[in-house]
Amino acid sequence: MNPSDFADHCHQVAAERARQCGGTAAQPGCDGGNIGPDGKPLSTAEMLIGLFQSFRPDGERLGDLLEPLPQAPQLLDRILPLYEVAGSGQRPGGGKDAFFVVRDAPELAPELAKQLGMQWLQGLQTIASQTGQHAISEHLGTDIEIRVLQGKAPKHPKEPVDRSKLLTIIADQLPEILNDLHSGAGSLNDADEQTAETHASLLAPAYYFIACDAMLRDYLMWPFLAETLTAADPLQAYFELWSHGVKARSFRDQQLDLYLPMPT
């Protein structure tokens, strides 16, 4: 199925799912149409933003949504647990979350959180190495301190000049490299992989806006990259942290802070 037909397929399945639930499918754009907040027409990929929210609370019919893709079984295995972890999206004070938020996170022991943090950094180093980012790989291979804290995570600096080197790697450089691969900017060897990359480019914004999290996006979309990069699930540890409500922060070049949620 070509990308244009696949986009139509996505809208159709989402609309059918919404009718089953007695509602309407999530629509992008400030007016629920084809025009974005800036007044410009939305791209085909932008029109799919909010797609995965349409399948809350249980992810039913996601199999139908992804079925045309060769990577469908692997993609489904990754995204279905998201619906279990984030629940219905109902806010305690009323209304629903626009994004997937872990509100009732299972408890995570601090020592396990630290171990997962180490595995995550090792996975990022592998990605950097396999994409030829040797300076990034070298920095991730240094002795980075991992602190496990508890409570509300502070916000990162907005200005790039004020960000730590580690934060720049995690939040900007590596996600941009992987997004380029999703967009077909990476080297591909055959027609099947080229088609996979085109579908990945189409879905990347919808995956990103699941939680406005590029690292979560790349974990969920890893099956698209599995043929290009040989790393064995390098972002699994990040998903484990995210699914336990852990927030990652870095304010120093060689320090990663993991904030566990307060017990309820």
Image: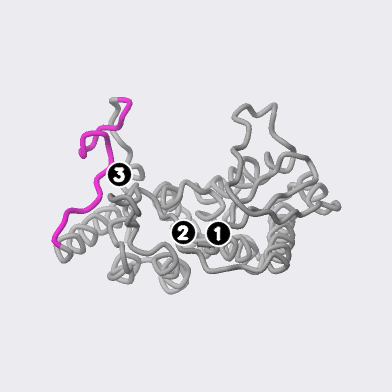
Q: Which x, y percent locates residue 176?
A: 59, 43
Mark 2 Cα-neighbour bin, 10 Å: few <14, some 14–19, many ≥20: many
Q: As shown in the figure, which amino acid type bears the numbered disc 3?
A: Met
- 1 or 2: mark nearer the eye: 2
Q: Image height check: is 263 above or below 94?
A: below
Q: Number of marks in the image?
A: 3
In the rendered structure, which disc, 2 or 3, sits on the residue that comes first in sequence? 3
Q: How crowded is mark 3: few (under 14 residues within 10 Å), some or many (20 or more)?
A: many
The residue pinned by badge 2 equals 102
Residue numbers of the magenta segment: 22-38
Which residue is denoted by mark 3 in the rendering?
Answer: 47
Spatial CA span between label 2 and label 3: 25 Å
Question: Is residue 34 within the magenta segment?
Answer: yes
Q: What residue type is labelled 2?
A: Val
Mark 3 or 1: the one toward you: 1
The reply to whether dot 3 and dot 1 touch (C-beta < 8 Å) is: no
Q: Which mark is residue 242?
A: 1
Q: Are marks 2 and 3 in contact (CB under 8 Å)?
A: no
Amino acid tagged 1: Trp
Asked whether, in this view, residue 190 is left or right of residue 94, the answer is right
Is the residue under label 2 in contact with that under label 1 (CB below 8 Å)? yes
Label 1 neighbour load within 10 Å: few <14, some 14-19, many 20+: many
Instruction: Tell me if 122 is positioned left or right of 224 in this view.
Output: right
Say which quadrant the N terminus sits in.
Answer: bottom left
Which residue: 58% across, 66% down? 240
